[in-house]
Amino acid sequence: MGIIDVKEVSFSFANGEGPKILDSVSFDADEYEFVSLVGPSGCGKSTLLRIIAGLIHPTSGSVSYMGSTISQPIRDISFVFQDFALLPWLTNVDNVSVGLSHTKMNEKEKEKVSIEMLKKLDLGGFEYAYPNVLSGGMKQRVGLARALISNPKVLLMDEPFSSLDELTARALRSEVIRILKDKAQSVSSVIMVSHNVEEAVELSDKIVIFSNKPTHVKAIKQISLGDNRNRHSKEFMKIVDETYSLLVG
Protein backbone atom coordinates (compact mmCIF):
# COMPACT_ATOMS: atom_id res chain seq x y z
CA MET A 1 0.00 0.00 0.00
CA GLY A 2 1.35 3.43 -1.00
CA ILE A 3 0.84 6.80 0.61
CA ILE A 4 -1.77 7.40 -2.09
CA ASP A 5 -3.77 4.43 -3.39
CA VAL A 6 -6.07 4.84 -6.38
CA LYS A 7 -8.32 1.77 -6.58
CA GLU A 8 -10.61 1.00 -9.52
CA VAL A 9 -11.59 4.65 -9.94
CA SER A 10 -14.24 5.37 -12.56
CA PHE A 11 -15.83 8.72 -13.29
CA SER A 12 -18.65 10.08 -15.40
CA PHE A 13 -20.09 13.59 -15.45
CA ALA A 14 -23.81 14.30 -14.88
CA ASN A 15 -23.84 12.32 -11.63
CA GLY A 16 -22.66 9.20 -13.35
CA GLU A 17 -25.18 9.43 -16.21
CA GLY A 18 -22.80 11.00 -18.73
CA PRO A 19 -20.15 9.30 -20.89
CA LYS A 20 -17.51 7.45 -18.88
CA ILE A 21 -14.29 9.46 -18.59
CA LEU A 22 -12.25 7.20 -16.30
CA ASP A 23 -12.63 3.43 -16.33
CA SER A 24 -11.32 1.40 -13.36
CA VAL A 25 -8.04 3.31 -12.93
CA SER A 26 -5.65 1.89 -10.33
CA PHE A 27 -2.11 2.87 -9.26
CA ASP A 28 -0.28 4.02 -6.15
CA ALA A 29 2.33 6.55 -5.06
CA ASP A 30 4.83 5.37 -2.48
CA GLU A 31 6.85 7.39 -0.01
CA TYR A 32 9.62 9.44 -1.67
CA GLU A 33 8.20 8.65 -5.10
CA PHE A 34 7.55 11.09 -7.94
CA VAL A 35 4.74 9.77 -10.14
CA SER A 36 3.78 11.31 -13.48
CA LEU A 37 0.46 10.74 -15.25
CA VAL A 38 0.70 10.95 -19.05
CA GLY A 39 -1.90 10.30 -21.72
CA PRO A 40 -3.77 11.83 -24.67
CA SER A 41 -5.18 15.32 -24.30
CA GLY A 42 -8.63 15.26 -22.72
CA CYS A 43 -8.35 11.73 -21.38
CA GLY A 44 -9.20 12.79 -17.81
CA LYS A 45 -5.78 13.19 -16.16
CA SER A 46 -6.69 16.51 -14.53
CA THR A 47 -10.06 15.12 -13.44
CA LEU A 48 -8.26 12.23 -11.77
CA LEU A 49 -5.92 14.63 -9.99
CA ARG A 50 -8.93 16.52 -8.60
CA ILE A 51 -10.42 13.24 -7.40
CA ILE A 52 -7.15 12.47 -5.58
CA ALA A 53 -7.28 15.96 -4.04
CA GLY A 54 -10.81 15.32 -2.77
CA LEU A 55 -12.22 18.17 -4.87
CA ILE A 56 -14.61 15.88 -6.75
CA HIS A 57 -15.86 12.37 -6.03
CA PRO A 58 -15.39 9.30 -8.24
CA THR A 59 -18.47 7.61 -9.67
CA SER A 60 -17.07 4.36 -8.32
CA GLY A 61 -13.84 3.15 -6.76
CA SER A 62 -11.84 5.03 -4.13
CA VAL A 63 -8.70 7.00 -3.35
CA SER A 64 -7.01 6.60 0.02
CA TYR A 65 -4.28 8.48 1.86
CA MET A 66 -2.30 6.41 4.37
CA GLY A 67 -5.12 3.87 4.33
CA SER A 68 -7.97 6.36 4.90
CA THR A 69 -10.46 7.12 2.12
CA ILE A 70 -10.29 10.66 0.74
CA SER A 71 -13.77 12.21 0.54
CA GLN A 72 -12.83 15.89 0.83
CA PRO A 73 -9.69 18.06 0.69
CA ILE A 74 -7.24 17.28 3.50
CA ARG A 75 -4.38 19.25 5.00
CA ASP A 76 -1.66 16.77 3.99
CA ILE A 77 -2.36 17.12 0.27
CA SER A 78 -1.63 20.35 -1.64
CA PHE A 79 -2.33 21.31 -5.24
CA VAL A 80 -0.32 23.33 -7.80
CA PHE A 81 -2.54 24.48 -10.67
CA GLN A 82 -1.64 24.84 -14.34
CA ASP A 83 -2.99 28.39 -14.60
CA PHE A 84 -1.40 29.58 -11.31
CA ALA A 85 -4.85 30.28 -9.74
CA LEU A 86 -3.56 33.36 -7.90
CA LEU A 87 -6.03 35.91 -6.55
CA PRO A 88 -5.23 39.16 -8.40
CA TRP A 89 -6.56 41.43 -5.64
CA LEU A 90 -4.13 39.94 -3.08
CA THR A 91 -0.41 40.61 -2.77
CA ASN A 92 1.94 37.70 -3.30
CA VAL A 93 2.46 37.23 0.43
CA ASP A 94 -1.30 37.20 0.97
CA ASN A 95 -1.74 34.67 -1.84
CA VAL A 96 0.75 32.40 -0.10
CA SER A 97 -0.98 32.95 3.26
CA VAL A 98 -4.15 31.46 1.77
CA GLY A 99 -2.40 28.11 2.20
CA LEU A 100 -2.46 28.70 5.98
CA SER A 101 -6.17 29.49 6.23
CA HIS A 102 -6.85 26.23 8.07
CA THR A 103 -4.28 26.96 10.82
CA LYS A 104 -4.64 28.79 14.13
CA MET A 105 -1.85 31.24 13.29
CA ASN A 106 -2.60 34.92 13.67
CA GLU A 107 -2.12 37.25 10.70
CA LYS A 108 1.38 38.35 11.75
CA GLU A 109 2.56 34.74 12.03
CA LYS A 110 1.07 33.87 8.64
CA GLU A 111 2.80 36.87 7.08
CA LYS A 112 6.16 35.93 8.58
CA VAL A 113 6.21 32.30 7.41
CA SER A 114 4.81 33.28 4.00
CA ILE A 115 7.62 35.80 3.50
CA GLU A 116 10.14 33.13 4.45
CA MET A 117 8.67 30.71 1.93
CA LEU A 118 8.73 33.32 -0.86
CA LYS A 119 12.40 34.01 -0.11
CA LYS A 120 13.16 30.28 -0.34
CA LEU A 121 11.74 30.39 -3.84
CA ASP A 122 13.84 33.43 -4.83
CA LEU A 123 10.95 35.89 -4.63
CA GLY A 124 12.42 38.14 -2.00
CA GLY A 125 11.54 41.75 -2.80
CA PHE A 126 8.24 40.78 -4.44
CA GLU A 127 6.36 39.92 -1.25
CA TYR A 128 4.05 42.94 -1.39
CA ALA A 129 3.74 43.15 -5.16
CA TYR A 130 0.63 41.91 -6.94
CA PRO A 131 0.59 38.91 -9.31
CA ASN A 132 0.04 41.13 -12.38
CA VAL A 133 3.63 42.41 -12.21
CA LEU A 134 5.14 38.92 -12.20
CA SER A 135 6.35 36.79 -15.09
CA GLY A 136 4.75 33.39 -15.67
CA GLY A 137 7.60 31.59 -13.93
CA MET A 138 7.38 33.90 -10.91
CA LYS A 139 3.61 33.39 -10.69
CA GLN A 140 4.11 29.63 -10.65
CA ARG A 141 6.70 30.03 -7.88
CA VAL A 142 4.07 31.88 -5.84
CA GLY A 143 1.65 29.03 -6.54
CA LEU A 144 4.29 26.54 -5.45
CA ALA A 145 4.99 28.55 -2.29
CA ARG A 146 1.26 28.53 -1.46
CA ALA A 147 1.14 24.75 -1.94
CA LEU A 148 4.22 24.13 0.24
CA ILE A 149 3.43 26.57 3.05
CA SER A 150 1.14 24.11 4.85
CA ASN A 151 3.87 21.43 4.99
CA PRO A 152 1.96 18.85 2.93
CA LYS A 153 2.99 15.22 2.66
CA VAL A 154 1.69 14.89 -0.91
CA LEU A 155 2.04 17.48 -3.68
CA LEU A 156 -0.30 17.30 -6.69
CA MET A 157 0.76 19.26 -9.78
CA ASP A 158 -1.47 19.75 -12.83
CA GLU A 159 0.78 20.49 -15.83
CA PRO A 160 2.66 23.07 -13.74
CA PHE A 161 5.16 23.98 -16.48
CA SER A 162 2.98 23.84 -19.60
CA SER A 163 2.18 27.56 -19.76
CA LEU A 164 5.84 28.57 -19.43
CA ASP A 165 8.50 29.01 -22.08
CA GLU A 166 11.06 26.20 -22.19
CA LEU A 167 13.89 28.09 -20.46
CA THR A 168 11.62 29.14 -17.59
CA ALA A 169 10.11 25.65 -17.37
CA ARG A 170 13.58 24.09 -17.21
CA ALA A 171 14.62 26.41 -14.39
CA LEU A 172 11.42 25.73 -12.45
CA ARG A 173 11.77 21.96 -12.88
CA SER A 174 15.24 22.22 -11.35
CA GLU A 175 13.74 24.29 -8.52
CA VAL A 176 11.11 21.62 -7.85
CA ILE A 177 13.78 18.91 -7.72
CA ARG A 178 15.85 21.03 -5.32
CA ILE A 179 12.88 21.60 -3.04
CA LEU A 180 11.93 17.93 -2.96
CA LYS A 181 15.50 16.96 -2.00
CA ASP A 182 15.47 19.49 0.85
CA LYS A 183 15.08 17.46 4.05
CA ALA A 184 13.50 20.48 5.74
CA GLN A 185 10.50 20.13 3.42
CA SER A 186 7.64 17.83 4.36
CA VAL A 187 6.71 16.57 0.89
CA SER A 188 7.37 12.88 0.49
CA SER A 189 5.33 12.06 -2.64
CA VAL A 190 4.47 13.96 -5.81
CA ILE A 191 1.85 13.16 -8.44
CA MET A 192 2.12 15.29 -11.59
CA VAL A 193 -0.05 15.44 -14.70
CA SER A 194 2.03 16.14 -17.80
CA HIS A 195 1.67 16.00 -21.56
CA ASN A 196 5.46 16.21 -21.98
CA VAL A 197 7.09 12.77 -22.01
CA GLU A 198 10.65 14.12 -21.73
CA GLU A 199 9.62 16.16 -18.69
CA ALA A 200 7.99 13.11 -17.10
CA VAL A 201 11.10 10.98 -17.64
CA GLU A 202 13.34 13.74 -16.27
CA LEU A 203 11.39 14.09 -13.02
CA SER A 204 9.74 10.77 -12.30
CA ASP A 205 10.39 7.53 -10.50
CA LYS A 206 7.29 6.07 -12.13
CA ILE A 207 5.10 7.00 -15.10
CA VAL A 208 1.46 5.93 -15.36
CA ILE A 209 0.42 5.83 -19.02
CA PHE A 210 -3.26 6.29 -19.89
CA SER A 211 -5.40 5.38 -22.89
CA ASN A 212 -8.00 7.47 -24.67
CA LYS A 213 -11.50 7.73 -23.15
CA PRO A 214 -12.92 5.77 -21.51
CA THR A 215 -9.52 6.04 -19.85
CA HIS A 216 -7.74 3.08 -18.31
CA VAL A 217 -4.11 2.44 -17.35
CA LYS A 218 -2.24 1.09 -20.39
CA ALA A 219 1.08 0.64 -18.59
CA ILE A 220 3.09 1.65 -15.54
CA LYS A 221 6.76 2.28 -16.27
CA GLN A 222 9.42 2.42 -13.57
CA ILE A 223 12.26 4.89 -14.22
CA SER A 224 15.67 3.89 -12.87
CA LEU A 225 18.01 6.64 -14.04
CA GLY A 226 19.23 7.92 -10.66
CA ASP A 227 19.21 11.55 -9.58
CA ASN A 228 21.41 13.17 -12.22
CA ARG A 229 19.48 12.83 -15.47
CA ASN A 230 21.00 13.89 -18.75
CA ARG A 231 18.35 14.51 -21.40
CA HIS A 232 20.93 13.81 -24.11
CA SER A 233 22.14 10.45 -22.80
CA LYS A 234 21.34 7.22 -24.65
CA GLU A 235 19.68 5.78 -21.54
CA PHE A 236 17.38 8.80 -21.19
CA MET A 237 16.38 8.80 -24.85
CA LYS A 238 15.76 5.04 -24.77
CA ILE A 239 13.26 5.44 -21.92
CA VAL A 240 11.61 8.39 -23.71
CA ASP A 241 11.19 6.27 -26.85
CA GLU A 242 9.83 3.32 -24.88
CA THR A 243 7.33 5.61 -23.11
CA TYR A 244 6.17 7.14 -26.40
CA SER A 245 5.69 3.64 -27.81
CA LEU A 246 3.53 2.64 -24.85
CA LEU A 247 1.56 5.88 -25.17
CA VAL A 248 0.72 5.57 -28.88
CA GLY A 249 0.87 1.81 -29.28
Image (tube, helix red, strand yellow):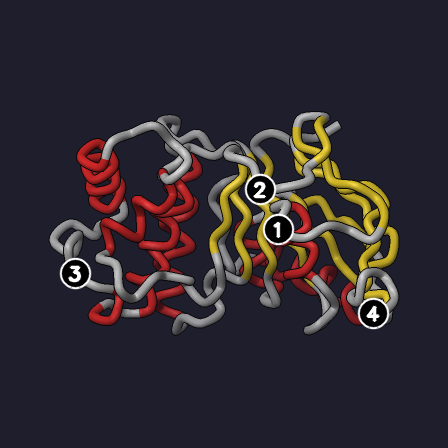
Report crowding for label 2: few under 14, some 14 to 19, many 20 or more residues within 10 A (C-alpha): some
Q: Of the residues under marks 2 and 4, which one precedes in the sequence?
A: 2
- Quarter placement of the C terminus: bottom right
User: Disc 4 marks which amino acid?
Assistant: Lys
Instruction: Please tell me in which quadrant of the rendered image residue 92 appears.
Output: bottom left
**Picture disc at residue 73:** 2
Q: Which residue position is annotated with label 1?
A: 55
Answer with left or right where residue 186 lies relative to residue 19. left
* Secondary structure beneath label 1: loop
Question: Gap in Å between the C-alphas at discs 4 and 3?
Answer: 43 Å
Give residue 171's position: percent from left, percent from top.
35, 58
Q: CA distance from mark 1 to mark 2?
A: 6 Å
The image's mark for residue 129 is: 3
Q: Residue at x 11, y 53 (%)?
A: 125
Looking at numbered disc 2 in the image, what kind of residue is underneath it? Answer: Pro
Q: Is residue 225 visible?
A: no
Tag nearer the camera, 2 or 4: 2
Residue 213's disc is 4
Mark closer to the chain start, 4 or 3: 3
Q: Mark 3, mark 1: which one is toward the viewer?
A: 1
> What distance separates the C-alpha of mark 4 from that of mark 1?
21 Å
Between 243 and 183, the residue placed more toward the observer is: 183
